[in-house]
Image (cartoon, rainbow, N blue to C red):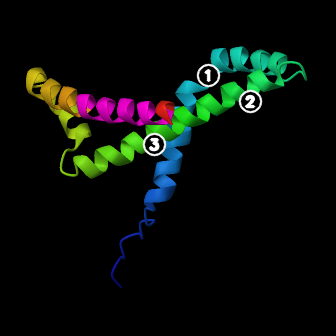
């Protein structure tokens, strides 16, 4: 009888993305020092007198998250063939060439975001 190779578990990209988000990104952002600063701040602001201030801060935070998500989608639309991760690894070899690409993408995205925010303010 022949030996069969063990079946490898199928990789689900959504599950991998969520694991990466939770374990790497949120793990570094929400360390004990950050939580120690956020909890008392929210506790103080959640009193009835300061509730409008808390809601304003949360609304600004939500708008910032939406702008970041929008800029990420916009980068994929404007620059579908530019893999910034590949440029980040290439920057170790040739930092000037990668810096030019990063700067170019950053200028385009920041210009679009500034115009978007200006359009919201004018309205």
Q: Nearer the viewer, mark 3 or mark 1?
A: 3
Which quadrant of the figure contains the N terminus? bottom left
Image quadrant in which you'd find residue 3: bottom left
3D distance between C-alphas at marks 3 and 1: 23 Å
Q: Give the range drawn in magenta.
A: 106-120
Q: Where is residue 62 in the image (x, y as percent from the top left)?
A: 60, 36
Q: Is residue 10 magenta?
A: no
Q: Is residue 110 magenta?
A: yes
Of the numbered discs in the image, which one, if any, rests on residue 55?
Answer: 2
Residue wearing tag 1:
31
Could you say which is closer to the camera, residue 58 or residue 122?
122
Answer with mark 2 or mark 1, whichever residue precedes in sequence. 1
> Which secondary structure, mark 1?
loop
Is 48 placed left or right of 6 in the picture?
A: right
Classified by dominant secondary structure, the portion drawn in magenta counts as helix
Q: In this view, does 70 lie above or below 39?
A: below
């Amino acid at each position: 009888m022949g030996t069969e190779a063990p079946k490898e578990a199928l990789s689900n990209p959504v599950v991998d993305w969520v694991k990466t988000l939770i374990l790497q990104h949120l793990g570094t952002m929400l360390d004990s020092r950050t939580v120690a600063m956020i909890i008392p701040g929210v506790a103080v602001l959640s009193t009835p007198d300061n509730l409008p201030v808390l809601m304003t801060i949360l609304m600004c935070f939500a708008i910032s998250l939406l702008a970041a998500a929008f800029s990420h989608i916009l980068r994929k639309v404007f620059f579908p063939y530019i893999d910034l991760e590949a440029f980040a690894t290439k920057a170790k070899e040739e930092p000037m060439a990668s810096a030019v690409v990063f700067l170019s993408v950053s200028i385009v995205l920041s210009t679009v975001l500034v115009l978007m925010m200006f359009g919201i303010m004018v309205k």
